[in-house]
Image (spheres, rainbow, N blue to C red):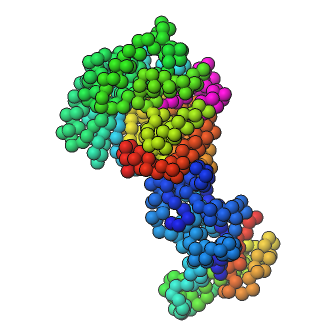
Amino acid sequence: MTALKDVRYRAGEAHRFEAAGQGFAYLPGAGAIFALDGAVEGVLAAIGKDGATHGGLVDALVADGTTPADAEGLLRELRQVRLIEHGDAVAFAAPEMPPADFPLQALVLNITNQCNLACTYCYEFGADKIATPAGKPKYMTIETARASIDLLIAEARGRPAVHVTFFGGETLMNFRLLKDVVEYADAATAAAGKAITYSLTTNATLLTPAIIDFLSDHRIGVTVSMDGPPEIQDKHRVYKNGKGSYAVIEPRLRALIAGHKTRAVTARVTLTEGVTDVIAIYRHLKDELGFHEVGFAPVTESGNRTYALGEGGMDTVLAQFRALADEWLAEALQGRSHGFTNVSETIGELISGVNKSHPCGAALGLMGVGPSGDLSPCHRFTDADSHSMGHVSTGIDRAAQTDFLSRGHVAAKYDCQSCWARPLCAGGCHHEAFVRYGDTGHANLHYCDWIREWTDVCLEIYGTLAARNPDFLVRFADRKGLS
Amino acid sequence: MKHLKPLNQKAERIAAAPVPEIEEADDVVALQDPRPHVPMGCSLSFSPGWEVDAGGGTAGLCQPVERDIYDCYVTCFWPVQMPDHVNYSPDWASNCAAATKDWRSLDLVFP
């Protein structure tokens, strides 16, 4: 008979980190974060790589002055959270597949695939585009838009609120439709007993005072795609004749930020070769123009485009992300919020302890609609015949959806199984994977080191706040609706 | 929890979940239910092989079913799905002097 004292423990899967002079563990099997005391650190050190027996650990603890009862209690705690495992314990199962009838929450309406700019890196029009718009409508009609809203309401079974994002092309090139859709959707959702919120992405070139008033009056969140100060913005974000767009958008942005009173106005920056001065870009957008939040993402490309960031570029970006993250933490320790979206988003996910089955909501709670009414997993697959997922008039193509979600499940990505960052990353963007590897279900291997380092930075921030200003995390969760 | 402090919502849920115990009483014991073991009567077939009791189950055997695996090894003429006493695993039962008592020391065979 195997007595308890002979049970042999080994270390469970954990990512250990330190912050504010304290030890922490992030448990990838669950997405949980625990602060560890000295006794825990001691036991984990004793177990090391070779393992240790229950009896041996208890004896050592008792020899150090712990009572036998406390020693047993300590080991029980460690077993409970699986920082230590024994015998036949199996690894945590991968997150379950969401149910097949997972209710829709948001639609991204691509109300036009036309754009008045010709940004060189654009995933919709650039060298790596996957869209096949030939022969399809360029502008969404009101009939298609209404059918989209009807589908959203019908497929949002049981949800109290839905969301519509207007997207393009350049969204404001079809502003007349946008107005009509808001009017229709407000009435339709009210009739269905649901709330609705809106957001819109724009390049800001077509903003007018009347449009800004409409956006503010209807509480439409605005994200502006832009890259930074003039010399950076005008590098890639140009008109078809090559002229930069900064001079056109600057006065419009100032009017937007001053006039939009009901929702945060956010900038979304695309990082490319030579556009890696994250701090200067942030300072300009946040401090000089007055955006509430600024988020950054590297350009999506197939691997060898001239505008690609490359290894060195990503290292520069990470170093600057760290510097901005330090600012974020310094503000948070003072109880103030900071507009660096990339930290805020990750902290929000760490608060709830997400453990994702899929990297994002694409084809789950969110789908894209092209100008023709074709459904796609998200706006990045709009108008791509290769990824059509039904039509607003005929409904969601369940077979295509199931195929997409099966490929994209984190358990289907071999490389992710031993990675501690998988609860947050789950393999990375489906679209990025398709452009880079030709398969939406391929892990974004070119970002693995980067994601782990970035997650580690955010965990350190989380640990520091938990130790020094835990109230901030509570209020942050409240503000983000996570409580 | 005394030594671990849950810091996010998922950690709170783990801390609130019941603790899986490993106590000696939880260990596997041959024919442990009902205890003490009272045989129901003779088995319908005899070793080697997996016997059933008069009720068609294994609870009422006069010997633990676990003993059968040893019997297969020692006496069966066709060593399939069992350690082979004659050719490949002659020492498999060397730590098992009395199968009813020492069957725990019969381990898997890794070819």
Q: Image height check: is A470 above or below A257?
A: below
Residue A228 highlighted magenta (yes or no): no
Instruction: Return the residue found at the far top.
Output: A241
Instruction: Please tell me in which quadrant of the rendered image residue A380 appears.
Output: top left
Q: Position of residue A31 (x, y in %)?
A: 51, 52
Q: Position of residue A363 (x, y in %)?
A: 42, 39
Q: Image height check: is A280 above or below A458?
A: above
Instruction: Please tell me in which quadrant of the rendered image residue A151 appears.
Output: top left
Q: Position of residue A340 (x, y in %)?
A: 48, 34
On screen, residue A268 versus residue B37, left or right, reads left
**Residue B88 in view here:** yes
On screen, residue A279 versus residue A106, left or right, reads right
Question: In terms of depth relative to the viewer, which is nearer, A393 or A262?
Answer: A262
Q: Position of residue B20 (x, y in %)?
A: 52, 70
**Residue A143 in view here:** no
Q: Image height check: is A395 above or below A246?
A: below
Q: Image height check: is A116 above or below A111?
A: above
Identify the residue at image location x=64%, y=79%. Answer: A3
Q: Looking at the image, how many numbered discs can be counted on the residues?
A: 0
Identify the residue at image location x=69%, y=68%. Answer: A52
Identify the residue at image location x=29%, y=17%. Answer: A209
* Quadrant the C terminus of chain B occupies: bottom right
Q: Which residues are magenta?
A: A295-318
Residue A309 highlighted magenta (yes or no): yes
Identify the residue at image location x=30%, y=29%. Answer: A261
